[in-house]
Amino acid sequence: MDIEKKGLSILGSTGSIGTSTLDVVRRYPERFRVVALAGGTNIDLLKRQAEEFRPEFVSVLDNDGAERLKQELDIPVEAGAEGAIKAATLPDVKAVVSAISGAAGLLPTIAAIRAGKEIALANKETLVLAGPLVMEEARARGVRLIPVDSEHSAVFQSLLGHRAEDLKRVILTASGGPFLKRRSDSLHSVTPDEALKHPRWNMGRKISIDSATLMNKGLEVIEASFLFGLPGDKISVVIHPESIVHSMVEYTDGSVISQMSSPDMRGPIAYALSFPERIDSGVKSLDFSCLRLDFSSPEPGRFPCLSLAYEALNEGGTHPAVLNAADEVAVEMFLKGALPFTGIPEVIATVLERYEGRRLSTIEDVIEADRWGREAARSLIKALN
Ligand SMILES: NC(=O)c1ccc[n+]([C@@H]2O[C@H](COP(=O)([O-])OP(=O)(O)OC[C@H]3O[C@@H](n4cnc5c(N)ncnc54)[C@H](OP(=O)(O)O)[C@@H]3O)[C@@H](O)[C@H]2O)c1
């Protein structure tokens, strides 16, 4: 084994972040080595990735997929959450790219932190669900947690070299998604295909719908709150349709430091993998001769999910976990045609109203809140149909 290379475990390797990560890794065979790949149900792609990168271990969502892969690969394959946890904690893994979508990303990421691995964190749900616990685990073990979300990567970069006490606020940018200009009274009839067409980013289905409702930004506000130790009132959101300024930090003297680049996730992924060095990730240079940058405030009436996320953050405890659970169910039902687009915030608001709250002391509290939120959202949608 070449000990100079950084051993990577890529959780969610078959997804949008996972494949972009492998694009970066492919450019630097002398720098990175793929130790483990964890995918879900896209067995064909996972098999191709395993053949190309020759990891020590592969994990998939279920036993059927594992059985198929075992027959086609001469690499150990395991299934389920246990498989993803093993992929995240193998001894040769130095850094874990946490890019499974949704709440399923939480346990493997926590296991990786407990095993002392560096974390390149794309799975925002890890911090949304269990922010205080995860940050405490990372602190206690001296684990480096570098954000991959482009906004958080921008904030992380804009904070370097500055004193925490000089910070006034963090400003997260949001593209506004595909319905920024659509008449609010026609949002009811939005189809899944329309909602999945993001104007700037090519992402997974769940995050694409969350970008259309701005719940993605709401989850990012919660993620930023835990990651950077800031209350909700120090985190603002501004609409920036061009997605060039990835986020900003304002300091007490009125100076604003931002990070800009072409919208391409390989940038923040490469940064998280190579930090503190910077490597060429393949991201195109900006052409300032024709650059237009627009900013505006999000309309609360058009994007109620954003306010719901702030409310859940302010309530604290397990409210963000319930918000996320209700959103995952509502988005799934919208994609299946069982809920109108405008039903997504309605379901989440009702579920949060009904939630009596629970302390957040252990991962079991998170799991229980997640279960409660899913059940409440499912029975509400069933009653509506
Ligand atoms: N895409 C972006 O630009 C972006 C930006 C910032 C943050 N993020 C965050 O990064 C995460 C991934 O986003 P994405 O856009 O890459 O999503 P995606 O394209 O839907 O990919 C999700 C990945 O997770 C795997 N997966 C899903 N459920 C799983 C489970 N229960 N067990 C094991 N694997 C599972 C999928 O496997 P299969 O496809 O094989 O089923 C796939 O590899 C999300 O938390 C998202 O919010 C994404």
Image: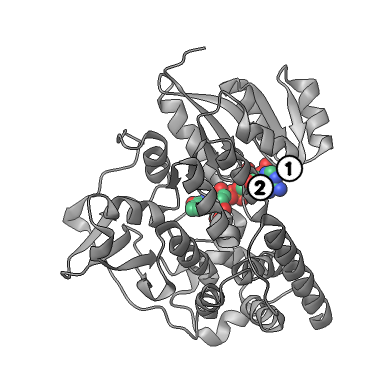
Q: Which residue is mark 2?
A: 107
In this view, the residue in front, 384 or 147, is: 147
Image height of 70 relative to 3, above or below: below
Amino acid at pointer 1 = Ala
Q: Amino acid at mark 2?
A: Leu
Residue 40 lies, with reference to residue 326, above or below; the image says: above
* Residue 81: mark: 1
Evaluate if marks 1 and 2 touch, with contact meaning CB atoms under 8 Å apart. yes
In the rendered image, the vertical position of residue 330 relative to residue 110, given as above or below = below
Q: Position of residue 296 (x, y in %)?
A: 32, 76
Q: Residue at point 30% right, 34% down? A: 277
Q: Is residue 198 visible?
A: yes
Q: Which mark is residue 253?
A: none
The verdict on label 1 being within 8 Å of ligand 1 is: yes
Name which quarter of the figure residue 282 lies in: top left
Residue at point 53%, 59% (across, down): 132
Residue 367 percent location from the top left of the image: 72, 59
Image coordinates for residue 163, horizontal then vertical, percent: 24, 57
User: Is 165 situated left or right of 44 in this image?
Assistant: left
Q: Could you tell me which quadrant the C terminus lies in?
A: bottom right
Q: Which of the two marks, 1 or 2, is nearer to us in this view? A: 2
